[in-house]
């Protein structure tokens, strides 16, 4: 049975416990066997965009605990959970980020959430949360035992130790985590801006979990990150941690698509300019 949490926990303690327990629940379900997990999977927008019984169980657990421990706060979950509270705060949940990795047997997946101050923008929809202030981001990668925390309520840490973004500022000195679906590569709407930006970093990494990537940007293991059309649950947890680690983030619209960028401030500005240069 997954742990019932004490409502007296601070927001930081609660967030850490939620992602640890949700990630642990998903991992235990996967350990029963990948084939059993695959038999429960349903395709969403593409073959690589799937939802499993573990995603649903982990989200259900987090929602249950939040409804009990923070009944006045709103909730938005990737797999459909939603609740509108009265506090002006909203918990944005990604129970398993990197589900295709999770479903494939990789260790590169996590459970993530963000606590935001969304007064005035919720419940307008998940896209309205892009610029919300992130009070706290929490990302837990169970199979590597990595817990990132950070936001306006919490200094940036990895497993309790302070972290900062890479001290190098220029994107040409840095690696970049990124993602673009193969179908977009040949489409100038997205492929053009992506190729402009992808030529700048010292190296590219495409690993399949935006929150795992952004945690690594915050600790300096990855220098920068950029991706288009990132939903709130893939963006806000890492955004809060990157800012707390001394980095910068930005959203730039090019050809009708929003591109999300994170890293040291100069590198973010350079990537923004490159993406904008791909405008049709």
Image (cartoon, rainbow, N blue to C red):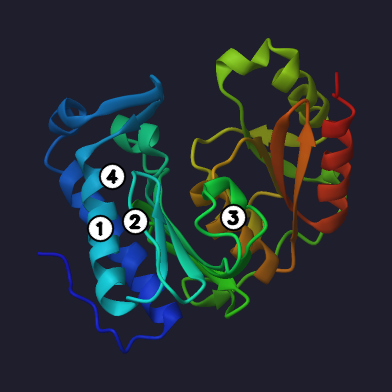
Chain-order first, disc 4 or disc 2: 4
| Viewer-side residue, 181 vs 166 | 181
Chain-order first, disc 3 or disc 4: 4
Evaluate if marks 1 and 4 touch, with contact meaning CB atoms under 8 Å apart: no
Q: Which mark is residue 24?
A: 1
Classed neighbour count for the residue bearing mark 3: other residues with Cα under 10 Å, few (<14), some (14–19), many (≥20): many
Q: Which residue is mark 3?
A: 129
Evaluate if marks 4 and 2 touch, with contact meaning CB atoms under 8 Å apart: no
Circle 4 — which element?
Answer: helix
Residue 244 in picture, x, y percent from top left: 66, 71
Evaluate if marks 3 and 2 touch, with contact meaning CB atoms under 8 Å apart: no
Circle 2 — which element?
Answer: helix
Residue 168 in view here: no
Spatial separation of the CA atoms under disc 3 and disc 1: 27 Å
Classed neighbour count for the residue bearing mark 4: other residues with Cα under 10 Å, few (<14), some (14–19), many (≥20): many
Q: Which mark is residue 55?
A: 4
Chain-order first, disc 3 or disc 1: 1
Q: Residue at x 52, y 36 (%)?
A: 207
Spatial separation of the CA atoms under disc 2 and disc 1: 6 Å
Residue 151 in picture, x, y percent from top left: 60, 72
Classed neighbour count for the residue bearing mark 1: other residues with Cα under 10 Å, few (<14), some (14–19), many (≥20): many
Foreground tag (3 vs 1): 3
Chain-order first, disc 3 or disc 2: 3
Horizontal side of 53 relative to 270 (left or right) equals left
Position of residue 151 relative to residue 106, above or below, is: below
Foreground tag (4 vs 2): 4
Residue 139 in picture, x, y percent from top left: 46, 60
Foreground tag (3 vs 4): 3
Q: Which residue is mark 2?
A: 142
Corner quadrant of residue 164? bottom right
Circle 3 — which element?
Answer: helix
| Viewer-side residue, 225 vs 259 | 259
């Amino acid at each position: 049975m997954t742990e019932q949490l004490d409502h007296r926990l601070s927001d930081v303690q609660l967030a850490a416990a939620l992602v640890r327990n949700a990630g642990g629940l998903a991992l235990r379900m996967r350990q029963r066997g990948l084939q059993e997990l695959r038999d429960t999977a349903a395709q969403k927008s593409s073959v690589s965009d799937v939802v499993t019984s573990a995603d649903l169980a982990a989200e259900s657990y987090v929602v249950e605990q939040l409804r009990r421990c923070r009944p006045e706060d709103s909730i938005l979950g990737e797999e459909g959970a939603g609740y509108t509270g009265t506090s002006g705060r909203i918990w944005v949940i990604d129970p398993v980020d990197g589900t295709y990795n999770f479903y494939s047997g990789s260790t590169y997946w996590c459970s993530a959430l963000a606590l935001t101050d969304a007064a005035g923008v919720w419940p307008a929809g998940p896209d309205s949360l892009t610029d919300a202030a992130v009070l706290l981001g929490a990302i837990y990668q169970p199979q590597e035992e990595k817990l990132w925390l950070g936001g306006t309520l919490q200094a940036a840490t990895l497993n309790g130790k302070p972290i900062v973004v890479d001290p190098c500022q220029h994107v040409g000195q840095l690696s970049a985590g990124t993602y673009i679906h193969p179908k977009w590569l040949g489409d100038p709407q997205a492929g053009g801006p992506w190729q402009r930006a992808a030529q700048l970093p010292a190296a590219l990494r495409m690993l399949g979990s935006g929150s795992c990537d952004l945690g690594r940007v915050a600790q300096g293991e990855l220098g920068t990150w950029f991706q288009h059309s990132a939903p709130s649950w893939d963006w806000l947890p890492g955004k809060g941690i990157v800012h707390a680690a001394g980095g910068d983030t930005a959203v730039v619209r090019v050809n009708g698509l929003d591109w999300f960028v994170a890293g040291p401030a100069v590198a973010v500005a350079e990537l923004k300019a490159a993406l904008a240069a791909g405008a049709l």
